[in-house]
Amino acid sequence: MTHAWTQRLVERHQQRQDRGLWRTRPLLTSAPGACVQVNGQWLVNFASNDYLGLAESPDLPQLAQALHQQAGMAGSTASHVLAGHHLPHHLLEDELADWLGVERTLLFSSGYLANLAAQTALLHADDCLYHDKLNHASLIDGAQLSAAKLTRYPHNDMNALSRRLASHCNGLTMVVTDGVFSMDGDCVNLPELLPMLAEQEALLVVDEAHAFGVLGQQGKGTFAHFACQPDQHTLRVGTLGKAFASSGAFIAGSALLIESIAQFARSYIYTTAQPPYQASFSRAALHLLKGDTGDVARASLAHLIAHFQQGIAALGLACASSFTPIQPLVLGSNARALAWQAKLWQQGYWVPAIRPPTVPEGTARLRISLSAAHTKTQIDGLLAALAICQQEEVGQC
Ligand SMILES: *Cc1c(COP(=O)(O)O)cnc(C)c1O
């Protein structure tokens, strides 16, 4: 007889496959970069979040090595609050704070953990928590682990948020949003959002995973892009695994807020600090990203984005209005997104199909992720490959 657990798992795997939701892990056997060897095949890579092309820069490991000098290569050996907080971590926190012009930052082992921390550490049961509907899964999980009641507002709809904020709240108010939305590439409407918050004495949390390094002067993110000033009641979450081409994450804000997170966040306290070498690597990435290397990369990225947008418009394919390196091509059904992904793969291009629950039901898409490491020729090649997907589909009708 089949064991009850076997039966459950086999059934649910079958359902997942039938619905076109099965996930696989492509295996990379080359270094990260604009061209990668994946499942044995060389492909042009539009799947990574290496927006500035730092992952390929030979300067990065060299500088990291130079900065790391005295510290060892082993792991941190403990949580930050025990024996795990090493000099490279401390220096990285200070340098991130200087870069952003905030009082303090706090380092985490991943963005997922950082996003659990801000909400679980600060919210009480009678507080009111508001989320954009398209927020990243890690923010949603943070809300669910927190004590507060979650209300979600339609994507970037500031009028809808304003109406919700106007209703009575027994406790304090927190608004949480992506800075650049991870699967759509559009930006939170900060100029409209910020004035609404002051009135409610609300705390704002902005997830800058796809904005830091990419948007604004010195890559200082969404606020710099809009020339807005974060106040004492703003927290920004940055991840070090995307434009930084490193690993880990941080929260930036006032000394009071950051200390409260360090005191109370279980995802900060009950986990081993990242290896000190990783922090030195991030320090090197920060140094490059805020300086000339970053400026050159951001300028060429802007050219590539414009070039791509012209090309995709010429094909008559509707890419959503994103001026960031994340260019979604919404195709609708899971089957269609998977078919286009496979067709592009055959032609030498790796563009991942993104399906529910990562995106809402019926909005499966190709997530085209551009990088300063790409060439115009590679982008033209992708556009030609997309044109073929388009033609073959018409041919089937
Ligand atoms: C990637 C991502 C995270 C998670 O960061 P990790 O360091 O990968 O855990 C959080 N928020 C957003 C918007 C992301 O895209």
Image (cartoon, rainbow, N blue to C red):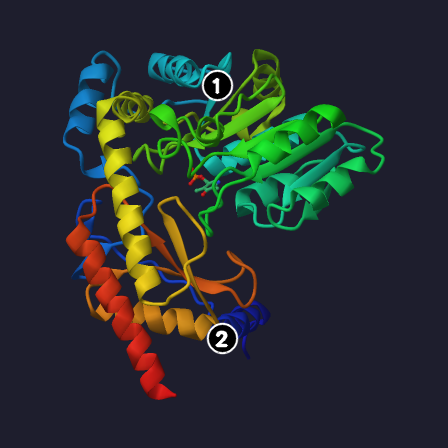
**In this view of the protein, which residue sits in the foreground, 16 or 375?**
375
Q: Quadrant of residue 221?
A: top left
The label nearer to you, 2 versus 1, is 1
- Quarter containing the N terminus: bottom right
The spot of residue 198 in percent (x, y) is 70, 24
The spot of residue 7 in percent (x, y) is 55, 73
Q: Which mark is residue 105?
A: 1
- Identify which residue is drawn at 48% across, 46% down: 186
Q: Secondary structure at mark 2?
A: helix
Please state which amino acid type lies under the numbered disc 2.
Gln
Placement of 278 over or under 332, stated as above or below: above
Placement of 258 over or under 190, stated as above or below: above
Please state which amino acid type lies under the numbered disc 1.
Thr
- Identify which residue is drawn at 61% across, 36% down: 176
Residue matched to label 2: 14
- Identify which residue is drawn at 54% across, 68% down: 362
Q: Quadrant of residue 338?
A: bottom left
**In this view of the protein, which residue sits in the foreground, 320 or 87?**
320
Placement of 7 over or under 45, stated as above or below: below
**In this view of the protein, which residue sits in the foreground, 16 or 316?**
316
41 lies left or right of 17: left
Q: CA distance from mark 2 to mark 1?
A: 45 Å
**In this view of the protein, which residue sits in the foreground, 43 or 153?**
153
Q: Count the marks.
A: 2
The spot of residue 223 in percent (x, y) is 49, 28
Residue 37 in view: no
Q: Is mark 2 within 8 Å of ligand 1?
A: no
Q: Quadrant of ligand 1?
A: top left
